[in-house]
Amino acid sequence: MKNSWWMRYLCIIFLGWLLATTTSFAAEEKITVRDFTLYNNGQNKPLTATLHLDYQLTDYLRDSLLNGGTLIHEVRFSLVSHNDWWFNKTEKFASIISELKYHSLSRHYQVVRKDTGEHWNFSNLASALSHLGALENYKLPALPTSVYKKDTSLYMEATLAPKEPAGLPLGLSTLFSEDHTLVSQGVLWALTP
């Protein structure tokens, strides 16, 4: 009888701990892939990608942005060659880098896409993040012909991180601070001829 009371007590404590940790994981800051689609425009033509991301910024990233910092957003596409006997081979295929800044005098957020040089201004952070996370009809570079001869997939992942300050040697600021990079879940898309 004494053991059953003790077991119930431990079960209640375990369930309480489980509920507490589960709710803290649900509130974790992150990048969520809401939609990712690849379109094949015909044989021997480049693929077209459409992507929509949602962001939950940490307090550190929000404060960094409001205090004049720049956030670097990168959407990476990689080719993954699957291997049954050894590690999969991954090679970088394409990358889209954008910057998010806040201008305190005009009280506007600015998104700058580095590959095209385009820039957009927004009056609030939600609109800027919505635009930053939307990629419509992006034409990927032409795929190598060898991808269709072996088991290959296209892997997409997005990151959002503070830009390192300009006067410090490369990587020095990361030695003394936590990693504040947000990373999306990866999306793997099988390539078929």
Image: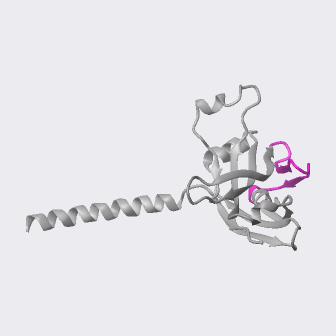
Q: Is residue 16 within the magenta segment?
A: no
**Front-most of residues 134 and 153:** 153
Q: Is residue 63 above or below residue 26?
A: above
Number of numbered markers: 0
Q: Is residue 121 within the magenta segment?
A: yes
**Front-most of residues 9 and 82:** 82
What residue sits 72% from the left and 44% below the top?
Answer: 65
What residue sits 63% from the left and 60% below the top?
Answer: 82
Q: Position of residue 146 (x, y in %)?
A: 78, 60
Q: Position of residue 133 (x, y in %)?
A: 76, 60
Q: Is residue 64 above or below residue 55?
A: above
- Quadrant for the N terminus in the image: bottom left
Q: Position of residue 168 (x, y in %)?
A: 72, 26
Residue interval drawn in magenta: 104-127
**Front-most of residues 173 and 188:** 188
Q: Position of residue 114 (x, y in %)?
A: 86, 47
Q: As drawn, which residue projects farthest toward the left?
A: 1
**Residue 173, located in which quarter of the rendered image?**
top right
